[in-house]
Amino acid sequence: MRRIALLLLTLLITLTMAVPVFSAEPAKKRSSKSVKKSSKTKGKKTAATRKSSPAPLPVKPLPGKVLLTEMKHWSTPDYTRVAVTLNHEVSFEKHEIAKSPGSAIPSRIYFDINGAKLGAAVKELAIGDGLLKSARAAQYSADTVRVVLDVDNIKDYKIFTFADPFRIIVDVKGERQASISALPPAIAALPASTDESVQKELAKLAPDQPKESLVQKAPPRAPLKSGKVRRIVVDPGHGGKDPGAVGPSGLQEKDVVLAIGLSLAKKLKNDLGLDVVMTRSTDVFIELQERTAIANQVGADLFVSVHANAALNRSASGIETYYLNLAKTEKAAQLAARENGTSLEKVSLLQAVLFDLMANYKLNDSAHLAEEVQKSLYRRISGRHPSTRNLGVKQGPFYVLVGATMPSILVESAFISNAQEEARLSDPQFLEQTAEGIVDGVHAYISSLK
Ligand SMILES: [Zn+2]
């Protein structure tokens, strides 16, 4: 196991230097770097495979094999995300047409996906949100699909890809709206039945527990003075077909984090008076790019993704909180791979373009939020379980945080892979305390804002 880990680390370091072809950076910036195809890819087509020569980039056509299956968008007056899903990794070339000669603002952004066919069910998206007019895809030639974004008025945009499944994502930015927006009709605010759901989810995990014991009074917190944080998105990880990590006795991360998330949402609303939006409040599958899109779409001021940790080493335990940045350790990269549902190799490809994608990420505020939540959560949990390990605040390239424009963190509440912590995670009181600890941290963060 150790040898494999070392091999993977070597691979990771090698690939961290690589820049994949899908970078939206100008070709001249990328031309000096190169990457060799690793033997680890086992013959898989990889977008990172290219020579050290400048653009055009090598194209590996796979006629008839690659299908553009879906095109979706999420939009607000100041932010739009378009996601194009394909059934296989593929290379593409990005182009833009300037609004006027020399202008940095494009009137059209388009990319040609080589060796691809357009799925019959893919429809043109009439966006019309002031940023983009529309997004459309067409079979440009026998084996090239062209995706065109007609631009209305934008400040900036980024194109990047996610792996497994392969997605090309375009994040477009406009002017930030000053006032809190009404929730888009497609997104439900915190359901009125949350109280009921909390009890139901908690009771599911411990059916024998009497309901009375689930309710716990928290000590009063000072009322919040700062009005800078009004809306928060709570994101219970995984769901539906994605169970997340599974504990030694079969407890599933998706169930645990839903229970924590529901409880957290209720407390943030009732105790802190915040407007809360959940990415999911039932056992449904939501793609990672949609979770971030929801947070941006509702104009959230904070984003908290809740997870349970897992490691090959079954004795690993403790609490840690992440914000978006390059992984500093192999363990952090491994965790990001697991949470991203992809490989270490793909994580290193993401790392290579991460700085370019982080232009709108609130790095310092996210680190600050992570510190407050980690401190408060550890204080709560260690009060009852003094042996709990404080693993601290860490950094990692998590898909779910990429493109988030507000302070955003990912909380790893406990190790579901550790038998003792798995047992705790099936205890409703522990989950309530975890939610309480996160609320403490959010409260401390907001209180510290001038
Ligand atoms: Zn997770």
Image (cartoon, helix red, strand yellow):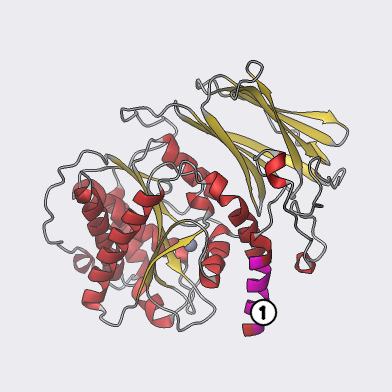
Classified by dominant secondary structure, the portion drawn in magenta counts as helix
Q: Residue at x 43, y 62 (%)?
A: 307
Q: Amino acid at mark 1?
A: Ile
Q: Quadrant of the C terminus?
A: top left
Return the x and y of residue 262 as percentages of the image width and height: 33, 54
**Circle 1 sits in a helix, a strand or a loop, which is it?**
helix
Image quadrant in which you'd find residue 180: top left
- Magenta-drawn stretch contains 36: no
Q: Position of residue 109 (x, y in %)?
A: 66, 27
* Residue 96 drawn at (x, y percent): 68, 27
Identity of the residue drawn at 71% across and 40% down = 28
Query: Where residue 193 appears, x then y in whole percent?
Result: 30, 46
Asked if 205 appears above or below 5 in the picture, the reply is above
Along the line of sight, the residue nearer the viewer: 1 or 280: 1
As for residue 6 lying within the magenta part, the answer is: yes
Q: How many marks?
A: 1
Tell me if 361 is positioned left or right of 270 in this view.
Answer: right
Q: Bounds of the magenta span?
A: 3-13
Q: Is residue 384 left or right of residue 405?
A: left
Q: Tell me the quarter of the image containing the N terminus.
A: bottom right
Question: What's the residue at 56%, 51% (across, down)?
Answer: 354
The crowding category of the residue bearing disc 1, from other C-alpha atoms within 10 Å (few below 14, some 14 to 19, many at least 20), is few
User: Residue at label 1?
Assistant: 4
Quadrant of residue 69 in the image?
A: top right
Which quadrant of the figure has residue 333? bottom right
